[in-house]
Every structure is written in structure tokens, then in C-alpha cells.
Image: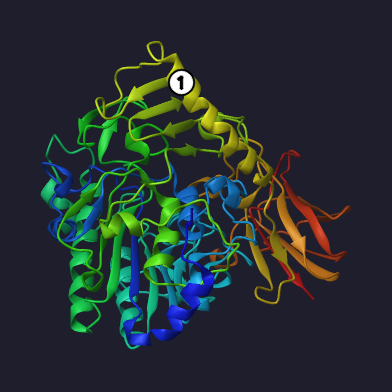
């Protein structure tokens, strides 16, 4: 069975096509918006007219699944591989970066002559060689970390008039974050309208903190049926911007031959209230599903997926109920756009093109496995086999969360009736499908390293969110950093070239311009340890060490007057 169009055939076809005939691609993904957070999916309160229109004009996958958290979904989307295989399977703790042998959708499109742009939330690494510009994107405007206001984001950002990073340099922008992302996306389209382009427009909204201009939340304030008015306001603002984007595509003349995809990265975070992560909602709308973001029940991982391409015939409001997932997006786009790929390139996902074409087709996949490998809810990192997992078929869901349960999803969307006792044969058959998955993933659950001394980024500013923790969370947002917690952890680093390095320890980033609150500092790397007194008022403690090339760990300590230590949450390393 062929997952992708043959590299040789695709190459011939791509040369035969003129640049104007190659379709453009815009992939829009929102953050923490669930299946039920759309009026076209039955939400009785939230108004999303522009997304409703796109829904009405698109082909929709109604049984489309992603991971239960941000980073894993993004890794699968970029590579076509299951998150564990990529190495990026958690939202912090040094597990947000992909192995460097993973080829991304941006690599493929750039190699095929496309202009590639990325705007918004990346969450797959802040340092070389893991930044979007290191992974195939040529034009990048983004915020660091997993959200605005998180630890490595530009200090002081709060969704309004923030400072983001454009192609390696910080730049201050005017306006609300979602408006900025769409504005930059439309700028990219305008600049590349005469050539084929691939734009990944990855929004940080409606992820918390739930900040939004008040006019967007106002229609939902005071409504006792609304779980979070600001969350709904953020979705309404996204909807407005989707309308502006579609008008812009028409204005610049590319709407007809642009593949426009809308999807979200996991289940809802705040569109409804729940009594625990795996319950049915106690308030609000979740499209009849159990569970929210971080759950492997249906409400945590089933999301909208609309694809619209007028010139390619992907219009008309057609539903496809075949089980599909984030790993299928890259193979599908490569197939639709006839992107040349090597014969040995075989991602985990499948091209959905035969389903989109509407032809009779013997779909070759009979199940999907989704496992959250990131140590959710105090679990160890990495978890054991079959921990926090769901095995999906068209009919069944075998869920291993706190307990192992079996549901007939076609009859029981709410997953209220556990049928494991009645169907032990089904449980046994589905459980056996997990073993090949684990055999492939488990060897890839190894550390991914940050480069030191890489000319693409020297100096390198490391942040505590990438400490390689065995369990729990490192300091990961502005609030936790300000408390100066007494905790530290190692960074997994790769010294690219032997030589002398300057290592500067700080509790706050350079731009915060704050002194180090400590009496004594210590650093350890590559078998070397150095200590120093902290001078009063010092903005950083500097060490210079001769380091050998190779992979190692970097650890830091800042001791207070009582001898208690926390790490240097921000540590700059420069090859001299």
C-alpha cells in the first residue's frame, strides 16, 4: 500500500506544472478550542459565522483525532509521525523538541520550491536546531514557549502590544495577539501571491490566560450557561479574523487555488466546565462528548477538521466519517500538491486524498493509537506501556486512563457504558494492536538536545521550561519564575565545537533587567564544576569554561543566605 505519491512520479509531475498551477496551502490551527466550540457543531450560544461558512463550503472529517495536549499534536502535524516517534511528546521538561532526523512538512514544501511561512505558536523548541526557521520555515513570526506569558516568551508579554520574534530578531507589534498573527499571515500571502506558498498559521488563542479585548467577550458576559465568557470571546475574535483572511485571499486573487485547512490542537480547555478531566460537562457544551484537554476520552482528542480547495473540488459541505488523525495531514498535503518525496520516506500517517476524491476505496487502516507520553497527572516520564492510551477503531474505543474501559463509540458517544466485561474478546484484540505501536515508539523516547556553539544561534539563552525533569513541571511561566522556586534540573545540550564558552546564570531574562537574588552560584557541565560568589546587584553570574564537543548535561544552582538552592532559570551560553 502506498502512503504517499511516489517520489519519482511526483517529481515528473511537479516539473510539468507551472508555478501558478501549484496550489497554495494555508493551515490554520487554534489552541485549546474543542469540537463543541463552534456554532456549526451545535453550540447554542457561541457565534462563529465565518467558520460556519467555511464549514458549509468545505469537506469535513467528523471523526478526526489529535493528541490531548499542544506539543504532541504539533509534532505529528509537522512530521506525519506519531508524537513519541518524533521525540516531542510533552509540553515542557525538555520533551518539546523533535529529533533532528525528522523531516517536516516545511522541509518538503521548501524543497519543492514553495515559499514557507510560520506565524504564531510553535511549541517545538526555542533554541537551535529546533526553531521554526531551523525546520524548513523561511519567513517566521512567532512567540517562544507554549504560550504568551510562559517562561521563555518575551518578558512582560500579555497578548496586547507584545514583542515577538521575526526571523531571529525581537520586534514589538501593535494590537491583540490574534489580530497580529492574522495580519502577518495576510502579509505573507500578499508577498508571495505570485508563487506557490505554504503558510502555517498557528494561533495561541484561545489558550489561557484568557485575555481578550472586552468587546469580544461582552456578548457572553452574565450568561449563566457560559463557562468562560473570555474564552468564547477569544473564539469569536478568531472567527472574525478568519473572515478577514478569506476576504484577503479573494482580494489578492489566490482563493480559488488555495487549500485552506481549519483545525484545533486538542479538546476544549474552557468551553465547558467538568467534574474532573474525564467527566461529561457540568456546564456548557461539548458536543455530547466526555473529557476535555489532557484527556484521551473523545472530548479531549476529537477536533474539527475542515479542508477547502475550490480548484481541487473540495467544496460543498461534504462529511467524511472515516477515522483520521493529525498524522495524516502531511501525507495528504504532499499528495494533493504533488510534492516530491523519496521512495523510502514513509510517515506513520496516510494520505486522505482517496477519501477526499470520493472514489470507492478500500481504506487500508483499521485502527489508530493515541498515547499521551508526557507523564500527565503526576505520572512518571516516560510512562509505561499502555498508560494513558486510547485504541480507536470505527466502532470501538479502548481507553486506558485511570481504568481500562471499552466503549462502542457509534452507539455511545458520551462513553457512559463500559462494555469491557461483555466483550473480553474485543478488549484482547484491541489491546494486541498496541504492542507494535510501543515497539516502534519506545526506542525513540530518548533525550533531544539543544545546541551550544551553533553558528545559527550563538549565544544561546536556555530557559527552565526545558529542564529535563523526571516528573512534574519545571518553572514554566512568568508567575512561577517570579516566586524563585527552590528547584533545579539539567538541560540536555550538545556542545557543537570544543572551545571556551561563557556561561551566564540569571533568575530572569536579560530584557527583564533584574538582579540575581542569591549569595553563591554553581555550574556543572561536561564533568566540570565551577562556583562563584554573587556580587550584590549583579544581573548575572559569569563563568568561563573550556568544554569538549559532544552531548552532555548543564546544571546550575543559585544559593540563598540559608544555603537553599534554586536553578538559574535563564542561562546564556556563548561560544567565545
Q: How crowded is mark 1: few (under 14 residues within 10 Å), some or many (20 or more)?
A: many
Q: In this view, does 540 lie to the left or right of 185?
A: right
User: Where residue 461 sits: x, y (%)?
Assistant: 64, 64
Residue at the spot 54% in from the left edge and 76% down from the top edge: 168
Find residue 454 and report its image quarter. bottom right
User: Where residue 225 sits: x, y (%)?
Assistant: 14, 35
Q: Is residue 237 left or right of residue 397?
A: left
Find residue 25 and report its image quarter. bottom left
Q: According to the image, label 1 marks what residue?
A: 427
Examine the rendering and report whether any part of residue 502 can be seen: yes
Viewer-nearest residue: 198 or 426 = 426
Q: Where 389 sits versus 168, above or below?
A: above
Viewer-nearest residue: 21 or 413 = 21
Q: Is residue 488 left or right of residue 191?
A: right
Q: Is residue 435 left or right of residue 179?
A: right
Q: Where 485 sits versus 510, above or below?
A: above
Q: How is the image coloured?
A: rainbow
Residue at the spot 23% in from the left edge and 57% down from the top edge: 59
User: Where residue 307 sits: x, y (%)?
Assistant: 27, 60
Q: In which quarter of the image is the C terminus?
A: bottom right
Q: Where 210 sits versus 342, above or below?
A: above
Viewer-nearest residue: 101 or 554 = 101
Q: Where 366 sits versus 402, above or below?
A: below
User: Where residue 424 sits: x, y (%)?
Assistant: 44, 14
Quick one: SS at disc 1? helix
Find residue 179 and report its image quarter. bottom left
Residue at the spot 39% in from the left edge and 68% down from the top edge: 162
Examine the rendering and report whether any part of residue 404 can be seen: no
The number of callouts visible is 1
Amino acid at each position: 500500500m502506498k502512503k504517499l505519491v511516489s517520489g519519482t512520479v511526483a517529481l515528473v509531475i511537479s516539473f510539468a506544472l507551472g508555478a501558478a498551477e501549484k496550489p497554495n496551502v494555508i493551515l490554520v490551527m487554534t489552541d485549546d478550542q474543542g469540537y463543541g466550540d463552534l456554532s456549526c457543531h451545535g453550540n447554542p450560544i457561541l457565534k462563529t459565522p465565518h467558520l460556519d461558512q467555511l464549514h458549509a463550503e468545505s469537506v469535513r472529517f467528523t471523526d478526526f483525532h489529535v493528541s490531548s495536549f499542544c506539543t504532541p499534536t504539533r509534532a505529528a502535524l509537522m512530521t506525519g509521525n506519531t508524537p513519541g516517534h518524533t521525540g516531542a511528546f510533552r509540553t515542557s521538561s525538555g520533551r518539546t523538541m523533535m529529533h533532528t532526523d525528522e523531516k517536516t512538512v516545511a522541509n518538503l514544501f521548501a524543497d519543492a520550491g514553495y515559499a514557507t511561512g510560520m506565524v504564531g505558536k510553535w511549541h517545538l523548541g526555542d533554541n537551535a536546531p529546533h526553531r521554526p526557521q531551523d525546520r524548513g520555515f523561511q519567513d517566521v513570526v512567532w512567540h517562544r514557549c507554549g504560550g504568551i506569558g510562559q517562561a521563555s516568551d518575551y518578558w512582560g508579554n500579555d497578548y496586547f502590544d507584545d514583542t515577538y520574534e521575526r526571523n531571529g530578531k525581537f520586534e514589538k507589534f501593535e494590537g491583540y495577539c490574534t489580530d497580529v498573527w492574522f495580519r502577518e499571515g495576510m502579509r505573507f500571502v500578499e508577498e508571495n501571491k505570485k508563487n506557490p506558498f505554504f503558510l502555517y498559521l498557528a494561533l495561541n488563542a484561545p489558550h489561557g490566560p484568557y485575555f481578550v479585548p472586552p468587546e469580544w467577550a461582552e456578548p457572553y458576559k452574565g450568561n449563566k450557561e457560559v463557562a468562560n465568557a473570555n474564552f468564547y470571546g477569544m473564539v469569536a475574535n478568531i472567527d472574525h479574523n478568519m473572515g478577514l483572511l478569506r476576504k484577503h485571499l479573494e482580494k489578492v486573487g489566490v482563493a480559488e487555488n488555495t487549500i485552506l485547512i481549519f483545525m484545533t490542537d486538542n479538546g476544549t480547555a474552557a468551553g465547558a466546565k467538568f467534574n474532573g478531566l474525564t467527566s461529561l460537562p457540568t456546564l456548557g457544551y461539548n458536543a455530547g462528548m466526555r473529557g476535555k484537554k489532557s484527556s484521551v476520552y473523545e472530548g479531549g482528542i476529537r477536533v474539527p477538521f475542515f479542508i477547502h480547495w475550490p480548484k481541487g473540488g473540495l467544496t460543498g459541505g461534504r462529511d467524511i466519517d472515516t477515522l483520521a488523525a493529525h498524522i495524516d495531514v502531511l501525507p495528504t498535503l504532499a499528495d494533493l500538491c504533488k510534492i516530491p518525496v523519496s521512495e523510502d520516506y514513509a510517515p506513520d500517517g496516510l494520505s486522505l486524498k482517496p477519501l477526499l476524491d470520493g472514489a470507492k476505496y478500500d481504506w487500508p487502516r483499521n485502527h489508530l493509537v493515541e498515547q499521551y507520553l508526557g507523564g500527565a497527572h503526576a505520572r512518571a516520564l516516560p510512562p509505561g506501556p499502555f498508560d494513558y492510551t486510547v485504541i480507536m477503531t470505527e466502532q470501538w474505543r479502548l481507553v486506558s486512563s485511570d481504568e481500562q474501559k471499552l466503549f462502542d463509540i457509534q452507539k455511545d458517544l458520551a462513553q457512559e457504558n463500559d462494555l469491557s466485561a461483555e466483550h473480553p474478546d474485543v478488549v484482547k484484540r484491541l489491546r494486541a494492536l498496541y504492542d507494535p505501536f510501543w515497539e516502534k515508539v519506545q526506542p525513540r523516547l530518548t533525550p533531544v538536545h539543544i545546541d551550544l556553539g551553533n553558528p545559527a544561534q550563538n549565544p544561546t539563552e536556555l530557559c527552565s521550561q526545558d529542564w529535563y525533569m523526571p516528573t512534574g513541571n519545571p518553572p514554566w511561566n512568568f508567575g512561577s519564575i517570579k516566586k524563585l522556586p527552590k528547584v533545579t534540573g539539567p538541560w540536555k545540550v550538545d556542545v557543537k565545537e570544543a572551545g571556551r564558552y561563557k556561561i551566564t546564570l540569571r533568575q530572569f531574562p536579560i530584557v527583564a533587567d533584574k538582579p540575581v537574588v542569591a549569595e553563591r552560584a554553581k555550574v556543572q557541565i561536561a564533568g566540570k564544576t565551577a562556583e562563584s560568589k554573587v556580587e550584590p546587584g549583579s544581573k548575572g553570574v559569569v563563568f568561563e569554561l573550556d568544554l569538549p564537543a559532544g552531548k552532555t548535561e548543564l546544571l546550575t544552582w543559585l544559593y540563598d543566605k540559608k544555603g537553599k538552592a534554586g536553578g538559574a532559570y535563564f542561562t546564556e551560553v556563548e561560544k567565545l
